[in-house]
Image (cartoon, coloured by chain):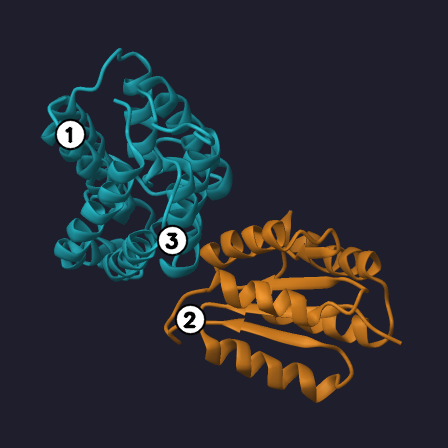
Amino acid sequence: MNLTTQETIQWIERANSVFQEKKDELTELDQVIGDGDHGINMARGFQAAAEKLQAGSYATPSDALKDAAMTLLSKIGGASGPLYGSAFLKLSSSTKGAETISFDQFKEAMSEATDSLKMRGKAEESDKTMIDVWGPFTAYLQVQSDVQPDEWIEKLADAKEKTKDMQANKGRAAYYKEKSVGHMDAGAASTYYLFAALAEILKERGE
Amino acid sequence: MSAVGIVLISHSDKIAEGLYELLRQVEQNVAIELAGGTDEGGIGTSLDKILQAIEKADSGEGVLLFYDLGSAKMNAELAIELAGKDNAYLVEAPLIEGAYIGTVEAGIGKRLHDIIEGIQKQFTVINE
């Protein structure tokens, strides 16, 4: 894998492009069983993060991820701000000092980031949240020895789809109880786009 | 004498402002800082606003934070961690009534932990 600082910045830029493009789709998902601001929030947060990283100068991927985290924390708003912010802080602290992020380091960082999401959101898998993509994707990564971008996207899409059948126990959607069943979770969808963007970058350089 | 400070966190700046008016009617000498709405003035909460409110509300006697809905709680917990203060506490109580008790008790000079205990006692019956 050996993700460089430049590729880390590219990842955030790519995620930003995707969130700008999918803003309406994410907002629509959130309108059905939430407060309807997820698309706007993700687009605003990642635009600010991409701009911050483009203007900065970073020695390691961890340094860039830290600035991304701080920007996401203050700019996303909604519940996703503290959640994505905490996750990126962990991705940063877990890879601190590394010139490039190896696949083993990435696996460990994803595991720590998922744990921090569970702690921050006080949620577990099957609560119909973004953890339902972070969790299964991280579990899949742990048993892999190399990066398979197409398979990543398949696993991520699969996890995102599965949130349709779940009943929400956390977040604003939880107020809708059984009515939340049948709709995809917006945070699960944005997590899919985030890591699909990384998979594409890894695929383009030939993994 | 300085008193415990109060921070009101709401998804809506109007809720925070309305509650501020209500509290000021009964208590004029306690620091009450607002963190309502997003940085852009929309519906939501802002980590930066909460951080600034904690700083402003703290006169050394500690700060009590009150919040309305789920994501406000996550941002408040993060803000307390990032502020690095061991005398700032997020109170689990209904926003209006909790903040009301907190403000009145801070105004009569009660200490941080006594106020927290008082509020907890008030709402334990509901929680059971």
Marks 3/2: CA–CA distance: 13 Å
Marks 2/1: CA–CA distance: 34 Å
Image quarter where the N terminus of chain A lies is top left
Q: Which residue does the numbered mark 1 point to in the structure image? A: A153
Using the rendered view, name the quadrant where residue A131 is placed: top left
Q: Is residue A205 above or below residue B71?
A: above
Three-letter code, disc 1: Ile
Chain letter, colour cyan: A
Three-letter code, disc 2: Asp
In the rendered picture, chain B carries what hue?
Answer: orange
Q: Picture coordinates of residue A52 (x, y %)?
A: 34, 56
Q: Picture coordinates of residue A100 (x, y %)?
A: 34, 27
Residue at 51% x, 37% y is A119
Three-letter code, disc 3: Leu
The disc placed on residue A72 is: 3
Q: Chain of mark 3?
A: A
Residue at 40% x, 55% y is A71
Residue A137 in sight here: yes
